[in-house]
Image (spheres, rainbow, N blue to C red):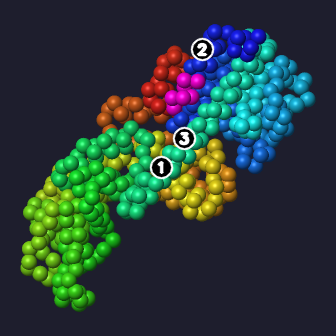
Amino acid sequence: MSTVESIKRDKLNTLINTSLLINSNYSDLSVLLEKIVESAMDVVEGEAASLLMLEPDGERLRFEIAIGPKGIEAKKMVIALDGIAGWVIKYNRSAIINDVLSDPRFDPTVQKVTGYKNRNMIAVPMCIKDECIGVIEVLNKRDEKDFDADDLNVLELFATQTAIAYENAKHYKKSREEIICLQDQLEQDRGYHTFIAKSKVMNEKLELCRNIAASDASVLILGESGVGKELIAEQLHLNSRRVNNPFIRVNCAALPEGLLESELFGHVRGAFTDAISDRKGRFELSDKGTIFLDEIGDIPLTLQTKLLRVLQEMAFERVGSNKTLTVDTRIIAATNKNIEELVRQGKFRSDLYYRLNVLPIYIPPLRNRREDIPELAHFFLKKFSKEVKKPFLGFSPDAEKLINAYSWPGNIRELENAVERACVLGKPPYIEEKDLLLKIESSSFEPEVNYSNTDLKSAVNDFKKSFIVKILNEHKWNQTAAAEKLGIQRTYLSRLIKELEIKEI
């Protein structure tokens, strides 16, 4: 009887559905592999399952996927090739073992660390072009049953599917990264940054930029230092009709008052001691384009009057000249200061504030959009890995946990600096926790929630998410135990995890 004929209809349907899944999505390899391994575990009626991948050194295995009661503990481990999984890798052969403890190949290391008792198991090699790159294991068949040849046949088919998914996803990722690199290079050559965002709030900000980009109304971008205000200004310009014209940046805090006036409006020869020739200012250079005035809260009161006139009439004079010049430019301003408080203190003109604040955009700090943190961290890792010529594959589990838990008071700028420093100090294949040089107290691992600048529904959802994550961590992500502690049904907890986009870190 053929392998396919021996497989029951329900198992065959699962295999078909898995094939459809493989061909539908390569964008998130980790999620795809987890679904395949989970399906394999269910089909052969196992209680736990894992996918172990061979490390680049060829001497160790790491848990790429670990599903089951002790999955979170197993995922932190890297093991030698001494056990059953190592035997499968070495000899490229499958194994059914219904009495694990009596098998001479059994290595108790994982069992000792996780505390999960292994009674029986199936282990099959995952191969690409006859090269064994990993092992799929399913542990402890339900109801104290033994694994059999049919289970082995099914699991070998799943291993083949997993290898196809892995290879296709690698090609997809490589092609996508090449395209992104080309796009990034093109944007960087034009002076623009890559916009990285996964959180709902930042994607909403991006959509807002697209919606208001067509307008010529002034925009005021508010937010802490390092949150990405300049990137939002770039997106406003790149999505506007002015995209093929200049995007001029001015840091109003970086120049003293005398130089700032000349920088903004230009000067004529002889206007002051060093004015040996006429010079165009940034407003003239931005004609038909966009001017971005960063740190607008630091502009002196004496210049605010002249800037207000530009906003109202698009007219000004160079320093030392009485000739009026006009421009067609869109003004985008940004500040990390409480500009309304500056208005109350008389340090910022109220009429200028109201002219700038036609379309306000608030950018939340990184700690309030934690979904962006891993995306940004991996982006910076790829960037700096190339610069320092070190082939890092990613972050270790402990480093990943620290990155996701840290509050990042310096926002994206601090995260970028931390990853760059880690790339310089660290050794491949992974960035370790110590390489990040982040001083953090244990209490800092509790996610920090800031309820300012949010509505009631968002604040409630933030609290729910934070509280559920805390309880899940306390119960090592055992949903049954966590649901009991929360006083809700397990099915309802599963739905909340999905709705609130809670992920294990």
Q: Is residue 454 left or right of residue 481?
A: left
Q: Amino acid at mark 3?
A: Tyr
N-terminal-most mark, 2 or 3: 2
Query: Looking at the rendered structure, which numbered label has been put on residue 172?
Result: 3
Front residue (pair 99, 172): 172
Q: Quadrant of residue 91?
A: top right
Which residue carries the number 2 mark? 13
C-beta proximity under 8 Å, tags 1 and 2: no
Residue at 51 percent of width and 29 percent of height: 24
Q: Earlier in the sequence, mark 1 or mark 2?
A: 2
Q: Disc 2 and disc 3: Cα gap in Å?
A: 26 Å
Position of 285 compared to 161: left or right? left
Q: Is residue 299 left or right of residue 72?
A: left
Residue range of the region highlighted in magenta in the rendering? 19-25
- Calculate the distance from the C-alpha at mark 1 to the C-alpha at mark 3: 11 Å
Q: Does the magenta run of residues contain 136?
A: no
Label of residue 179 in the image: 1
Assess whether mark 3 and mark 2 are in contact (beta carbons under 8 angstroms). no
Task: Determine crowd level at label 2: few under 14, some 14-19, many 20+ residues with C-alpha closer than 10 A.
Answer: few
Above or below: residue 146 compared with residue 166: above
Which structural element holds mark 3? helix
What residue is rendered at 43% in x and 53% in y?
183
x 79%, y 14%: residue: 148
